[in-house]
């Protein structure tokens, strides 16, 4: 949302072309929407409320919905990160792509899930 020429934006475009899947449960989608609507993110992206709504709706439309069959909490310190991990585990994700790699630590590896920066994911996809 903040940088249309970033690795994150490239990953969203790859998801749009069905080259990579985005998985999320309802709770994570709602958390993502709430974070995108924060004034600091809207300001940094230079977007209006309507533009943020359009962006969030477009991202959520690309999401492969995940049913939460088992709640893995608590594993991490941040409840928002817990939602990411829970969606990744229940959605059989290969990786969690985030700028927040440190807060996930080694926990995702217990589930066979890598934690990658967006640029690392792009590199992996290109290999």
Image (tube, rainbow, N blue to C red):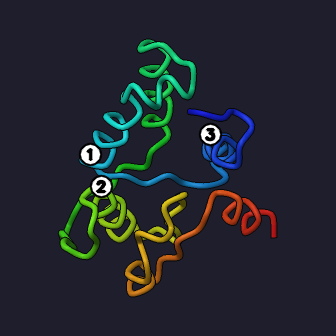
Q: Earlier in the sequence, mark 2 or mark 3?
A: 3
**Total marks placed:** 3
Mark 2, Cα crowd under 10 Å, few <14 / some 14-19 / many 20+, is some
Rendered image quadrant of residue 109: bottom left
Mark 3, Cα crowd under 10 Å, few <14 / some 14-19 / many 20+, is some
In the drawing, does residue 17 fall left or right of residue 22? Answer: right
Q: Residue at x 69, y 66 (%)?
A: 120
Looking at the image, is mark 2 or mark 1 nearer the viewer? 2
- State the image coordinates of residue 115 (x, y, percent, origin top left): 52, 71
Q: Secondary structure at mark 2?
A: helix
- State the image coordinates of residue 32 (x, y, percent, origin top left): 37, 41
Residue 26 is tagged as 1
From the image, tell me which residue sits under label 3: 16
Give the CA separation, mark 2 to mark 3. Answer: 24 Å
Q: Earlier in the sequence, mark 2 or mark 1?
A: 1
Rendered image quadrant of residue 56: top left
Between 39 and 109, which is closer to the camera in this rendering? 39
Q: Are marks 2 and 1 in contact (CB under 8 Å)?
A: no
Between 37 and 19, which is closer to the camera in this rendering? 37
In the drawing, does residue 17 fall left or right of residue 50? Answer: right
Q: Earlier in the sequence, mark 3 or mark 1?
A: 3
Q: Secondary structure at mark 3?
A: helix
Q: Residue at x 53, y 69 (%)?
A: 95
- State the image coordinates of residue 1 (x, y, percent, origin top left): 56, 33
From the image, tell me which residue sits under label 2: 80
Give the CA separation, mark 3 to mark 1. Answer: 20 Å
Looking at the image, is mark 2 or mark 3 nearer the viewer? 2
Q: Are marks 2 and 3 in contact (CB under 8 Å)?
A: no
């Amino acid at each position: 949302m903040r940088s249309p020429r970033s690795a994150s934006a490239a990953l969203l475009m790859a998801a749009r072309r069905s080259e990579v899947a985005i998985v999320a449960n309802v709770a994570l989608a709602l958390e993502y929407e709430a974070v995108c609507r924060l004034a600091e993110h809207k300001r940094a992206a230079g977007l209006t409320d309507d533009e943020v709504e359009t962006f969030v709706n477009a991202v959520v439309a690309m999401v492969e919905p995940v049913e939460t069959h088992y709640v893995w909490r608590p594993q991490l310190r941040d409840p928002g990160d817990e939602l990411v991990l829970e969606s990744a585990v229940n959605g059989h994700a290969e990786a969690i792509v985030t700028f927040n790699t440190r807060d996930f630590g080694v926990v995702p590896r217990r589930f066979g899930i890598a934690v990658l920066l967006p640029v690392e994911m792009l590199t992996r996809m290109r290999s």
